[in-house]
Image (cartoon, helix red, strand yellow):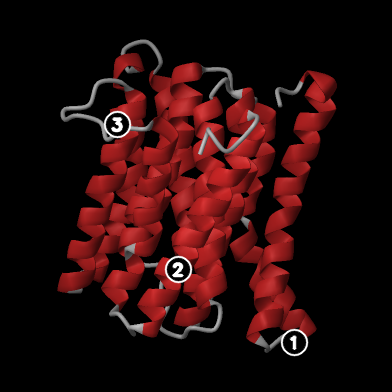
Amino acid sequence: MSGLARSPQEAMILGMVTVGLLALVAAGLLRWLRAGRIWTDLLVPACFLVAYWLTYNKVPSFPPVGAVNKIFFVAVIGTALGVLIEATGRSGLGRALVLAQPIASAAYIGTARLPDALPEVAAAALWGLLVMHGLSCGTGQSEDESGTRRATLLGIACAGFAPIALLGASSSSFQLSLLFATTIAAIVAANISNPDFGFRSASLLGGAGGMIAVAQTVTLITRKTDMLALAVFTLVFVTPFVVDPVLRRVRATNKAVRIATFVGMCLLPVGASLATVIARYGSSFPV
């Protein structure tokens, strides 16, 4: 890809187009084959792992050395546990793991900092817990709409986190966030009218869990994160809890209208976060 592009920006755009098309084809093929829900649920974590590989050009050795390498195994283990939960129907265990994973991830990523930075690791764990709660508990009653909302929220959040990662001195996390956001957009586009599409345990533990590990790495390891921008950005995960009262007030029943309203409301805190970044850094923002 680098041979076709004249600049890092062009290479990034070319990479996004490539992974987006691959995700669109994979999602469309699974829908055409009427694959089971477990296979559909693997789309999101598989895309995260592909985005990781394209960003870092490697599959880390085990046991991993360094926080960046640990991200890969957080996603792999989360995906495996998610598939196991769906295959056995242990929904109660799934809910427990979804909320426990961000805590374990923060401790795993921040192991080297635990002796002298326990409050920061605890804050990263609490932040991850809030993210998972927003993704898993506040995304609607209808199962097909809930899956679409969860995927949409994660995609918007990935795109919104990208500039914060760049400010946090992590250009690789910036790239990974945008690549993953592009694949999620393609998956949602292919499944917007698919009643069998779901964003279940593997997507939460593997895909969302992987991105939470990325954010925890930027926050705990580089230690250059703009905390005000991150705080404003985090409001996106509160959106699922306020969108349904708004939809009931306007009496929106059409799924497309409901999803469009959900997207619009999610974009508000993301836009506010970006505006915060621009206002605070202006021309000094790295591009």
Q: Which residue is mark 3?
A: 70
Residue 269 higher or lower than 145, as above or below: above
Q: What residue sits 49% from the left and 53% below the top? A: 19
Residue 185 at what x, y percent from top left? 57, 61
- The quarter holding residue 283 reads top right
Few, some or many residues within 10 Å of mark 1 (<14, 14–19, 20+): few
| Residue type, numbered disc 1 | Arg
- The quarter holding residue 193 reads bottom right
Cα separation, mark 1 vs mark 3, equals 46 Å
Is there CB contact under 8 Å for labels 1 and 2?
A: no
Few, some or many residues within 10 Å of mark 2 (<14, 14–19, 20+): some
Residue 100 at what x, y percent from top left? 31, 47
Precedes in sequence: disc 1 or disc 3: 3
**Disc number lying in front (1 or 2):** 2
| Res 230 visible | no
Precedes in sequence: disc 1 or disc 2: 2
| Residue type, numbered disc 2 | Val
Q: Which residue is mark 1?
A: 251
Is there CB contact under 8 Å for labels 1 and 3?
A: no
* Side of 45 where 280 appears, left or right: right
The disc placed on residue 25 is 2
Circle 3 sits in a helix, a strand or a loop, which is it?
A: helix
Viewer-side residue, 244 vs 216: 216
